[in-house]
Image: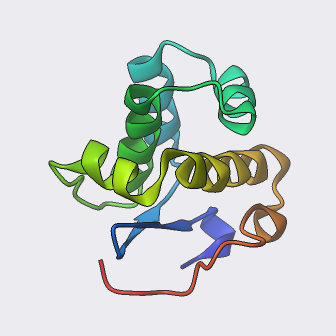
Amino acid sequence: MNPYRDEFLLVLSGKTFRMRPTFDALAQMEGETGVDLLALATRLSSGEVGLKLCAAVVAAGIRGAGGTVPRDLGQMILAEGIVSVLKQLSGWLAGVFSGDTDSASAGADNSPKEA
């Protein structure tokens, strides 16, 4: 994990996925969700999102880190618990906006594991 690139590790169904907020990934988040980034971060932190929006954010972040999005991403999010995933994502996006990635990952186990 590279905190200088705002990388984040998200665990879904026992697998760890590296996420990175590249320009393309952030633009993809906006394009796929139809929501601007600040509003998206606000909605994630308040829990006012559905599975489709959550999956779009995760997929864009995985692609931003050069990873492959699993076909069963929605099922993996459900298995992990959408509330748990939303908490992790909102902290990550808040850190991206503030530049404070250390506190964005506080409380999450972001130790590297194989994906």
Question: Can you say which quadrant of the picture contains the N terminus?
Answer: bottom right
Where residue 102 appears, as percent x and y from the top left, is 79, 71
Determine the residue positioned at 64% across, 62% down: 6
Determine the residue positioned at 73% across, 38% down: 45
Q: Is residue 26 above or below residue 95?
A: above
Determine the residue positioned at 72% across, 53% down: 91
Where residue 69 appears, as percent x and y from the top left, is 24, 52
Residue 62, quarter of the rendered image:
bottom left
Residue 60, quarter of the rendered image:
top left
Question: Can you say which quadrant of the picture contains the C terminus?
Answer: bottom left
- Left or right: residue 97 compared with residue 71: right
Where residue 93 appears, as percent x and y from the top left, is 68, 46
Q: Nearer the viewer, residue 80 or 59?
A: 80
Q: Residue furthest top?
A: 34
Determine the residue positioned at 58% across, 47% down: 83
Residue 8, quarter of the rendered image:
bottom right
Where residue 29 appears, as percent x and y from the top left, is 47, 30
- Left or right: residue 103 compared with residue 45: right
Q: Is residue 44 above or below residue 84?
A: above
Q: Nearer the viewer, residue 68 or 99?
A: 68
